[in-house]
């Protein structure tokens, strides 16, 4: 039977703590947009603000929704002035249409369709957005263009396999086999790896598989995560504990805030901003798909299962029934770490547009009141991956191969929506 995604402990940590911080962050972000913000960055904020409780702690659904939102926004902006390839072909050109109205209508129609319980929030923002656009043919054309783009994108993704993601999962017995981890008695979205990717070919981004249980490297990896990632670790530093909590939130939410900050700092025009958001969210959505395909193909156990059973045939490991991870283990197999996949995928997509040298300050929904500073996107992505080891919920090899897969996906996704070269006739 299909079960709700993420539950009990994760909701306590990722939602209850996040709600006040989310309200404060949303208010500060909207007031800070100012002259450097535009309709694209604003509606990205609206979209991410709408996720809790709609798809809170369901990062797979978040990634798909955000990719659809930003594909529709990109195509709507592009219809007004074609500067890049479209995601969905056939949208009529709309020169002279209001860009602000087009972006608002595209985002509004996707969000009320995919997040119906947040319709009131979305409709209020839509009303405010249209109120500042002068009435006339430009406004009407913008609304029509945005609605047409949303409809085209939603139709294209209507039967992409996401509805069949929550299929039943029955654990197998034996060494290395993924088992449910408390407080969960289910595995999340075992069928997500069958969702149709947005822009990549899954076959080009495979990972080699988890380490053999009898190897010396596996024993070292297990010993490392047990030492640094235990609830009562004496090895993990205060900063490493902060990093674990800081990056614990859902990847699509955290990395969209980072993207929004970077895009506003660079003062990108709406066309380039729309493309950048689309690439970042294509990369994360496809990162989840390719990562989950591997997760449920290899079905590798989590560290807490490995140490409690230790029935791995490796003389270098031993069981410890009392060990607990620092943070709650999400209800999915270990390999690869899709948290790492998404961080690197998002970073590589942004790097393709902005370069790596992007100083920024980030906040976190799972560690309210704390900010961290970074000088490069790659540094943030690296820390994001390491956080899962500090939390005690992933082996090093899951993070290492997650990095490899995420970079591959992000670089491939960044090739989408290429600039259109206009050949001038003399």
Image (tube, rainbow, N blue to C red):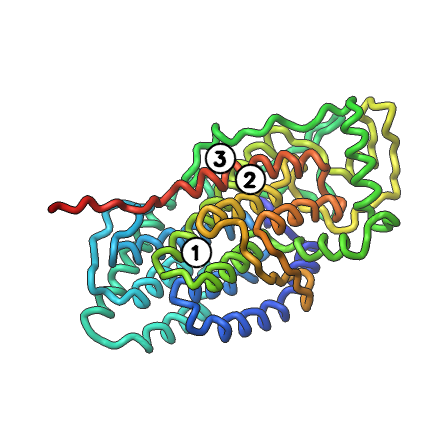
Residue with the most extreme left position: 426
Reading the image, the residue beneath label 1 is: 114
Instruction: Say few, some or many: other residues with alpha carbon within 10 Å of mark 3 (under 14 / 14 to 19 / 20 or more).
Output: some
Q: Is residue 68 left or right of residue 1?
A: left
Residue lying at 82% horizontally and 41% vertically, measured from the top left: 226
Dividing the picture into quarters, in which one does residue 299 lie?
A: top right
The quarter of the rendered structure image containing the N terminus is top right
Residue lying at 46% horizontally and 64% vertically, measured from the top left: 264
Which circle's residue, 1 or 3, is located before the other in the chain? Answer: 1
Mark nearer the viewer, 2 or 3: 2
Which of the pair 317/85 is nearer the observer? Answer: 85
Reading the image, the residue beneath label 3 is: 194
Q: Which label is found at residue 131?
A: none
CA–CA distance in space, label 1 to label 3 = 20 Å
Which circle's residue, 2 or 3, is located before the other in the chain? Answer: 3
Residue lying at 63% horizontally and 69% vertically, measured from the top left: 21
Dividing the picture into quarters, in which one does residue 72 lie?
A: bottom left
CA–CA distance in space, label 1 to label 2 = 26 Å
């Amino acid at each position: 039977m299909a079960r709700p995604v993420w539950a009990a402990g994760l909701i306590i940590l990722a939602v209850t703590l996040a709600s006040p911080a989310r309200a404060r962050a949303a208010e500060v972000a909207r007031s800070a947009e100012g002259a450097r913000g535009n309709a694209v960055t604003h509606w990205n904020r609206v979209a991410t603000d709408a996720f809790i409780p709609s798809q809170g702690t369901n990062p797979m659904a978040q990634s798909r929704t955000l990719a659809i939102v930003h594909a529709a926004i990109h195509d709507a902006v592009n219809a007004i002035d074609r500067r890049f390839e479209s995601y969905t072909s056939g949208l009529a050109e709309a020169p002279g249409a209001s860009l602000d109205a087009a972006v608002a209508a595209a985002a509004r129609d996707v969000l009320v369709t995919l997040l119906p319980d947040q319709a009131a929030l979305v409709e209020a923002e839509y009303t405010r957005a249209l109120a500042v656009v002068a009435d006339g043919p430009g406004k009407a054309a913008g609304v029509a263009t945005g609605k047409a783009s949303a409809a085209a994108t939603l139709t294209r993704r209507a039967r992409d396999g996401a509805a069949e993601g929550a299929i039943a999962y029955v654990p197998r017995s034996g060494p290395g086999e993924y088992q449910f981890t408390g407080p969960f008695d289910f595995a999340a979205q075992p069928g997500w790896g069958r969702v149709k990717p947005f822009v990549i070919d899954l076959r080009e981004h495979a990972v080699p598989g988890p380490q053999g249980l009898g190897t010396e490297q596996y024993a070292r990896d297990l010993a490392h995560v047990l030492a640094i990632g235990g609830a009562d670790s004496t090895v993990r530093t205060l900063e490493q504990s902060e990093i674990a909590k800081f990056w614990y939130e859902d990847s699509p939410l955290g990395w969209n805030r980072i993207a929004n900050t970077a895009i506003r700092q660079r003062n990108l025009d709406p066309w380039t901003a729309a493309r950048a958001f689309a690439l970042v969210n294509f990369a994360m959505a496809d990162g989840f798909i390719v990562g989950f395909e591997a997760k449920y193909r290899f079905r590798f156990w989590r560290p807490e299962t490995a140490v409690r059973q230790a029935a791995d045939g490796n003389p270098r490991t031993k069981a410890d029934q009392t060990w607990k991870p620092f943070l709650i283990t999400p209800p999915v197999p270990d390999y690869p770490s899709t948290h790492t996949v998404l961080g690197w995928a998002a970073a590589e997509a942004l790097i393709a547009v902005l370069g790596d040298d992007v100083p920024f300050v980030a906040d976190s929904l799972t560690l309210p009141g704390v900010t961290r500073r970074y000088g490069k996107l790659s540094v943030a992505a690296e820390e994001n991956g390491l956080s899962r080891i500090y939390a005690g919920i992933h082996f090093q090899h899951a993070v290492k191969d997650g990095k490899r897969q995420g970079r591959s996906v992000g670089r491939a996704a960044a090739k989408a929506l290429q600039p259109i070269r206009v050949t001038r006739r003399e």
